[in-house]
Image: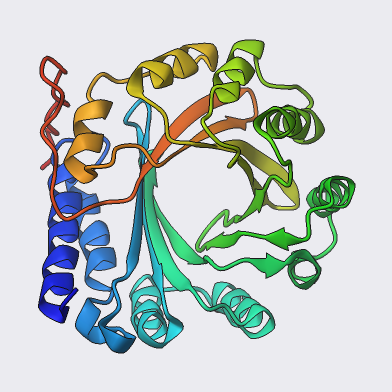
């Protein structure tokens, strides 16, 4: 693909991301400047080594009350933009020290930033997207209850690496890591996912959810664990993408709201549809988040599918 074509694709992805904001009531007018700032600090192909395309991922909560954008790529192109972005976000010295320490210890090959809206606020941070050995990540967690739970799970399951490390900045900051399931087949991985919820939250997933996961076409499950103030505050099973009729049932099983505008928004962002699903539990609350890899062109919503309600803020 030529540099011109790659640039046009990147600009189209940005435009599609911005268009979806007008259809998300959770995005208030004052938030626009923060989301635009993030987009402006994702490098375009001419700013990346060899004209590379930055990787994007977008998330929508099934109830359309959560949204998240992330991007990552080669540090040579990403780090200068990331540094400027975090500076404009008034990153605290303590947060900057965490980034410097992790960058020095882990030497990531894929670096990026992210921004999200939930709970009436904008949250942002940075992430490393290339796998790292658990033995290199573990010392960076300090000593607390969450660390011991993580270490036991990783040891018992024979997990040797962390797939992703993510860190928020600002008040009440958190760290999130992603672990791939080592099971060789779907059934083993589904059992492992259920056992992980028991280990980290005290209770397994509903049997109907496990049955839905067993219908996955191939074993590619994972686990996302969020740590805040030494405690595990959210655990999510990562599953392959699935049709919307299955997502509706999954939301019902998790007591999570399914907004009928979700399908239309996903189709605006990605021709390929949902790329992965996170089935999460934070305290007593269950939730379902869908992730898409934004593409350069939007697909029209399925005929008869309700449109997402327009935002009153934008």
Q: Residue at x 84, y 51 (%)?
A: 158
Expressed as whole percent of the image width and height from the top left, the position of residue 146 reads 79, 49
Q: Which residue is drawn at 20% across and 84% down?
A: 46
Q: Would residue 165 be seen by someone viewing this image from the given angle?
A: yes
Q: For residue 174, what is the image quadrant?
A: bottom right
Q: For residue 219, what is the image quadrant?
A: top right
Query: Considering depth in this image, is 137 or 189 the residue closer to the camera?
Result: 189
Q: Residue at x 11, y 30 (%)?
A: 310
| Numbered label tally | 0
Reply above or below: 254 against 58.
above
Expressed as whole percent of the image width and height from the top left, the position of residue 171 reads 53, 57
Query: Considering depth in this image, is 26 or 72 the residue closer to the camera?
Result: 72
Expressed as whole percent of the image width and height from the top left, the position of residue 19 reads 12, 47
Reply above or below: 59 against 9.
above
Quadrant containing the C terminus in the rendered view: top left
Q: Residue at x 43, y 35 (%)?
A: 241
Expressed as whole percent of the image width and height from the top left, the position of residue 266 reads 25, 36
Reply above or below: 71 against 220.
below
Quadrant containing the N terminus in the rendered view: bottom left
Q: For residue 214, what is the image quadrant?
A: top right
């Amino acid at each position: 693909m030529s540099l011109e074509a790659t640039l046009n694709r990147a600009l189209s992805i940005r435009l599609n991301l911005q268009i979806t904001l007008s259809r998300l009531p959770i995005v208030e007018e004052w938030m626009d400047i923060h989301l635009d700032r993030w987009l402006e600090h994702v490098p375009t192909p001419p700013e990346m080594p060899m004209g590379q395309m930055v990787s994007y991922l977008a998330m929508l909560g099934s109830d359309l009350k959560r949204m998240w954008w992330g991007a990552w790529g080669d540090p040579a192109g990403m780090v200068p933009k990331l540094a400027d972005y975090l500076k404009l976000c008034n990153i605290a010295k303590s947060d900057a020290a965490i980034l410097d320490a992790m960058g020095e210890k882990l030497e990531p090959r894929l670096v990026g930033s992210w921004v999200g809206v939930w709970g009436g606020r904008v949250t942002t941070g940075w992430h490393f997207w290339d796998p790292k050995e658990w033995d290199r990540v573990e010392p960076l967690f300090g000593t607390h209850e969450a660390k011991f739970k993580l270490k036991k799970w990783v040891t018992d399951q024979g997990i040797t690496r962390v797939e992703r490390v993510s860190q928020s900045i600002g008040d009440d900051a958190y760290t999130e890591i992603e672990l791939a399931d080592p099971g060789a087949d779907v059934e083993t991985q589904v059992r492992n996912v259920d056992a992980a919820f028991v280990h980290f939250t005290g209770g397994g997933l509903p049997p109907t959810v496990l049955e839905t996961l067993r219908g996955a076409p191939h074993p590619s499950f994972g686990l996302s664990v969020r740590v805040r103030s030494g405690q595990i505050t959210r655990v999510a099973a990562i599953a392959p993408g699935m049709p919307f009729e299955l997502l509706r049932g999954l939301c019902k099983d998790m007591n999570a709201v399914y907004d009928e505008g979700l399908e239309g928004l996903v189709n605006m962002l990605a021709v390929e549809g949902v790329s992965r699903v996170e089935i999460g539990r934070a305290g007593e609350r269950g939730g379902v988040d869908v992730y898409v890899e934004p593409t350069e062109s939007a697909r029209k919503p399925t005929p008869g599918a309700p449109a997402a309600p327009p935002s009153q803020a934008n």
